[in-house]
Image: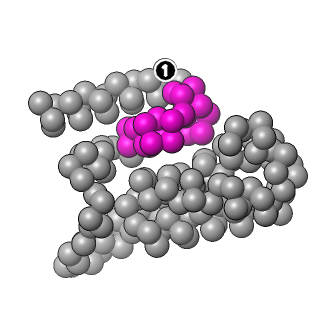
Amino acid sequence: MAEGKASTLGFEEAYCAHRLTLLRLAYLMCGSHELSEDAVQSAFTSAHARWDEIEQPLAYLKKAVINLVKDGQRRRFRLLASTPERPLVALPPEVDEMWDQVARLPWAQRAVVVLHYYEDLSLVEIAAILDRRAATVRSDHRRALDKLRKEFV
């Protein structure tokens, strides 16, 4: 659905129309179904009270989901760092070699790759979502591709 049409949707319609897309985005960023569900639910919850004031709801929700996933991962990493033994992580079967390499990218580079190749957003749109300059996003994109190429050559 085009961004212009998303702004004409009511909250409930937007939830039905964009929930799965946002869940996919969150999952690609964190690799956890539970964290994805939490991030998407929190994003919609925070948007609900001022839904009519949000100019571009889908862009707002994507940005919120990315920020919530990032915050959740920071908390999880702090918790794991304080835990003497780290539990084994069982990855879902759909995680392949490429995802494994994308997941190893630094946060900003991973966000650019996921938003560009999985969400099909332009680098300019990604810059707006991540609150970064377009030149910085282009640089992150180039560096991420360079790292991925080195792994698969």
The correct choice, above or below, for 49 with respect to 56 in the image is below
Q: Looking at the picture, how far across and down is residue 85, in whole percent?
A: 19, 79
Q: Could you tell whether 93 is left or right of 33 in the image?
A: left
Q: Looking at the picture, how far across and down is residue 58, in whole percent?
A: 68, 46
Q: Nearer the viewer, residue 75 or 150?
A: 150
Query: Which quadrant of the rendered structure holds the C terminus?
Result: top left
Q: Tell whether position 11 is magenta.
A: no
Q: Which residues are magenta?
A: 108-131
Q: Looking at the picture, how far across and down is residue 140, in whole percent?
A: 39, 30
| Residue pointed to by mark 1 | 135
Task: Name the residue type under label 1.
Answer: Ala
Q: Tell whether position 125 is magenta.
A: yes
Q: Nearer the viewer, residue 70 or 114?
A: 114
- Prevalent SS, magenta region: helix
User: Residue at horizontal 20%, vertical 75%?
Assistant: 88
Q: Is residue 86 visible?
A: no
Q: Looking at the picture, how far across and down is residue 55, in whole percent?
A: 81, 41
Q: Is residue 22 visible?
A: yes
The correct choice, above or below, for 91 with respect to 14 in the image is below
Q: Circle 1: is it few (<14), some (14-19), or many (20+) Cα within 10 Å?
A: few
User: Residue at horizontal 43%, vertical 37%?
Assistant: 117
Q: Secondary structure at mark 1?
A: helix
User: Residue at horizontal 20%, vertical 30%?
Assistant: 149
Q: Could you tell whether 57 is left or right of 52 in the image?
A: left
Q: Could you tell whether 90 is left or right of 41 in the image?
A: left
